[in-house]
Image: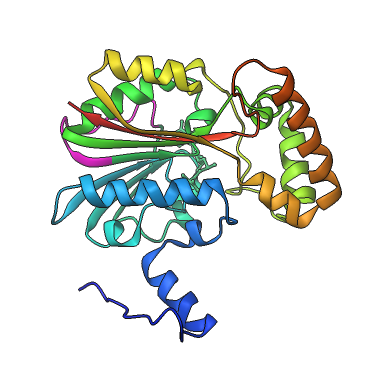
Amino acid sequence: MTKTFALDPIHATPAETTTAAAAIHPASLLALPPGEAKQSLLTVHSILDAKLPAGPLSIYEAGGGSTSFLPLNVLRRAHITVVDIDPDQIRNNDYAQEAILGDIQSHRFAPRSFDLITCYNVIEHVPDVEAALTGFCEALKQNGLLLIGAPNPKSLSGVVTKYSPHWFHVWFYRHIRGEKHAGLPGEAPFPTHFHPLVTLSNLEAFAAEHGLQVIYRKTYESPRYPEMRRRKPILAALVDAAARTMNALLPGKTDVRHGDYHVILRKL
Ligand SMILES: C[S@@+](CC[C@H](N)C(=O)[O-])C[C@H]1O[C@@H](n2cnc3c(N)ncnc32)[C@H](O)[C@@H]1O
């Protein structure tokens, strides 16, 4: 049964507000700093709420690891299957009914098995994204949804991540983000490949060719910026100044801070 909270927004204490939020949103969303990333994820949640069928759901989290970004009211009525290549991530997963140690490029399910497939913060790590996406297309039911969250390779953070070595990513996570366990077994950051299909325009072209309709698409400021402004204000001011200069020099309305995107595709 789903618990409902009648919260008086004027008189609620901070603890009551936090408890109410934790009853609705996954910890992954609550951990995001206020900003465009959180706002887009809330929009994704409202679309999933509106578009997924009522009743029990069948969900595949491809490269799901041990953290879900899905809304709790969706998770609570779903049978969740996670496939991940990392044994530590599979061991740490505590919400999937089925946790499979496997490779999303080659692991296959029966056709039309899932109402929703989510591949969140994963495709940038996969050498053959086309193989993974082909498997998702087959495994989706008609009208099923595919949610992809990924870094934008055409942004400042995307270019830096794509062309810098893995040890730099570990250093950034440890010393700028303050993640002491970064790089240890089962802990982010994971090695990146940046297959061409991670680029949003290529992903959209693939979708059009494979009977997938784009129902939501949003590039947004990477949550690393608000995080850095809070933790390392001087470094953040320098990066913001560099980003402003690049935006002024680049044609059109490019915002190089748009480091990540969400896409929701519907199988026609
Ligand atoms: C950055 S983590 C994201 C985990 C989770 N989706 C999240 O957002 O917290 C990337 C995940 O992709 C998994 N992964 C990378 N390549 C994979 C592959 N070929 N098949 C399955 N999982 C893979 C990693 O093991 C890791 O758990």
Q: Is residue 36 magenta?
A: no
Q: Does residue 200 appear left or right of residue 70 in this picture?
A: right
Q: Is residue 32 left or right of residue 7?
A: right
Above or below 3: residue 120? above
Could you say which is closer to the camera, residue 177 or residue 9? Answer: 9
Describe residue 103's horizontal placement relative to residue 55 as left or right. right
Q: Main secondary structure of the magenta part?
A: loop
Q: Nearer the viewer, residue 72 or 183?
A: 72
Residue name at image x 62 percent, y 29 percent = 255
Of residues 138 and 196, the one drawn nearer to the viewer in this rendering: 196
Q: Quadrant of residue 161?
A: top right
Of residue 42 and residue 10, the one placed in the foreground of this image is 10
Q: Residue at x 43, y 70 (%)?
A: 21
Residue 113 colored magenta? yes
Residue 5 at least partly seen? yes
Colour pattern of the rendering? rainbow
Residue 1, how many percent across, how many down?
A: 20, 73
Q: Quadrant of the C terminus?
A: top left
Q: Read off the magenta span.
A: 104-116
Position above or below: 259 against 72: above
The residue at 68%/52% (across/down) is: 227
Q: Position of residue 105 (x, y in %)?
A: 39, 26
